Amino acid sequence: MQATFDPRITAARPDLAAEHWQGIIPAERYAKGILMQVVAPTAPLFGAPRSDGPMHSEMLFGETLMCYERTEDGWCWGQMTGDHYVGYVPSDLLVPAVTEPTHRIGSLRSFVYPGPSIKSAPVMALSFGSQLTIVQDKDGFSALAGGGFVISGHLFPIDYMAEDPAIFATMMAGAPYLWGGRSSLGMDCSGLVQLAFQACAIPCPRDSDMQEREIGHAVSFASRLRRNDLVFWKGHVGIMLDTDTLLHANGHHMACIHEPLAVARGQILAKSGNDISTIKRLDPLPK
């Protein structure tokens, strides 16, 4: 019986596959891949090399992709090194000159200035979770390896480990809903959970069904819910802020909002016919 592989996280097509799948997944040819890094505030990841289709995920500044194919019409097909998601990213948003990140943006957003002055016009705005390589700190500014300056107080060391994902999820309250989004400018339900858990150095897959399968252990519906419990429906997830309050990015409000779990449950049941499928808990949370 032939094994099945999730195409979302398997870098393999009938005509091309990552070199490490040779002898396991049949393909016309195999490629070693070139590591590339995002140099734009965000980079959309699509399931096909066309920008008018649905965005499957989104890469943040400084994140990396193992590129297995560069097309003549401006696409890189490859696999994100963080959560292993596979897709097509516009080539002009990536460079092969990868720098090792030293810090992450820890504020909701932060500006990149051309010089160490808050009066200069920013050259870009970076979202929470973006990865930066800092080469020097001086007078409240941090200089980036590729040029530009950010406010030092907006940064966390890359190995910083927080202990409360809900703190970071709450930062996103009010952000607009965006299918496939992973930034403070727009995110979907699983993107919100992923950002919050990654900020606490907790490995977290991209999609809600993956999260439901891989994160924590299931608790009874009759249990008293806790902060940071994850509540799952078919195709949806939210994070508990306390015993009664759910924070979730959702298409009903087109925003990341917090509301009573009972209200969200009723709205989702009325709209989709789906009730809560699982409640998952990390107990204890990693420290």
Image (cartoon, rainbow, N blue to C red):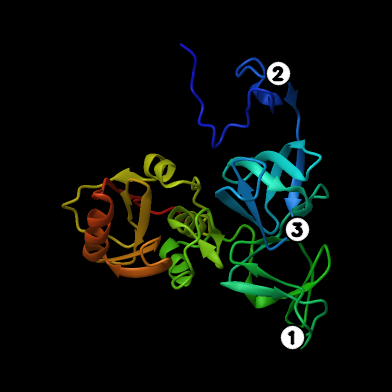
Distance from Cα at disc 3 to Cα at disc 2: 32 Å
Answer whether residue 164 is visible to the viewer in this image.
no
Q: Earlier in the sequence, mark 3 or mark 2?
A: 2
Q: Is residue 276 visible?
A: yes
**Which of 261 and 186 lies nearest the eye of the viewer?**
186
Name the mark on residue 118.
Answer: 1
Task: Tell me the quarter of the picture where residue 22 sits.
Answer: top right
Where disc 1 sits, the SS reads loop
Disc 1 crowd, CA 10 A, few/some/many (<14, 14-19, 20+): some
Circle 3/circle 2 CB separation < 8 Å: no
Q: Earlier in the sequence, mark 3 or mark 1?
A: 3
Query: Residue 221, how many percent across, how many down?
Result: 19, 50
Q: Amino acid at mark 2?
A: Glu
Q: Are marks 3 and 1 in contact (CB under 8 Å)?
A: no
Could you classify mark 2 by the number of other residues whose Cα lies within 10 Å: few (under 14), some (14-19), or many (20 or more)?
A: few
Number of marks in the rendered image = 3
Q: Nearer the viewer, residue 190 or 216?
A: 190
Q: Is residue 208 above or below residue 34?
A: below
What amino acid type should be assigned to the residue bearing mark 3? Val
Q: Residue furthest bottom?
A: 119
Tag 3 secondary structure: loop
Q: Which residue is labeled 2 in the image?
A: 28
The residue tagged 3 is 39
Q: Seen in the image, is 77 located left or right of residue 73?
A: left
